[in-house]
Amino acid sequence: MQNPPVPEATSDDFSRTRRSLLVRMKSEDNQKGWRDFMEKYGRFIYGMARKSGFTQEEAEDVMQDTLVSVARKIPDFHYQGGRGSFKAWLVMIVKSRIIDHLRKKYRRLPSLGGAAAGEDGTRMEERIAQEEDALSHESMWAAEWEHYVLETALARVKDSLPAKHFLAFRMCTQQQKSPAEVAKALGLSLPMVYLIRHRAGRRVATEIEQLREGK
């Protein structure tokens, strides 16, 4: 069996952020707006930092610095109504914070092979340039976003299902077990396993659509 159906994404799916969220974020005392922002984008920012080679603690620092930058810049952000503007704006900030932290990290690294200071500085700039080139590829950001959306959707569905039912769904879709194998392993009837797989799959697809629409 295949993984739960994931509707095809377009380049604009990433950026379906509702205007109401941006308005609330511009209100400095609106904590709910910022909590909503972190719920929607925090794990994504953290995931990109981890993919750039940071430790858990370093990735958390990148995420916090990104939040601070967004808070400082959000009053000057003008929502244009079309999809894409918020995505480009946020990605630009995340990239900048990742590069800043990479520079700090590389400066702390000891010189390799007794290289002179100037040579070591050149190596650092070369490594930074390589990272910047990697971060410039839209496909990497899109892939990380799709991973985030799927994992978040699964977590939402997990919270709403009995533990055994969610396990049955994961065994069918991710472990590639047949419904008969799942039924035997978990002590469920075969029709029940089919029903769980169908209903949970539909709920995951619904959650994915809502996440892409900023809900």
Image (cartoon, rainbow, N blue to C red):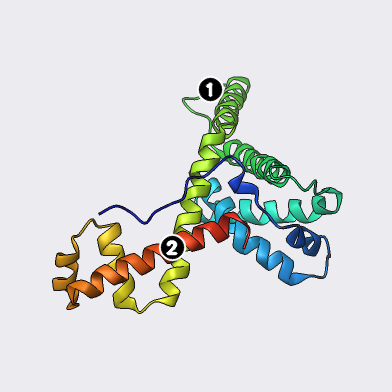
Residue 1 locus on image (x, y percent): 25, 54
Q: Crowding at label 2, few (<14), some or many (≥20) Cα neighbours within 10 Å?
A: many
Residue flagged by tag 2: what amino acid is it?
Val
Q: Is residue 30 visible?
A: yes
Q: Nearer the viewer, residue 213 or 134?
A: 213
Q: Is residue 54 visible?
A: no
Q: Mark 2 highlights which residue?
A: 204
Q: Mark 1 highlights which residue?
A: 115
Residue 37 locus on image (x, y percent): 67, 61
User: Residue placed at 59% from the left, 47% from the top?
Assistant: 13
Instruction: Report whether 211 appears left or right of 187.
Output: right
Q: CA distance from mark 2 to mark 1?
A: 53 Å
Q: How many marks?
A: 2
Residue flagged by tag 1: what amino acid is it?
Ala
User: Residue placed at 44% from the left, 76% from the top?
Assistant: 160
**Does 70 appear above or below 115?**
below
Instruction: Report whether 207 appears left or right of 64.
Output: left
Residue 172 locus on image (x, y percent): 26, 61
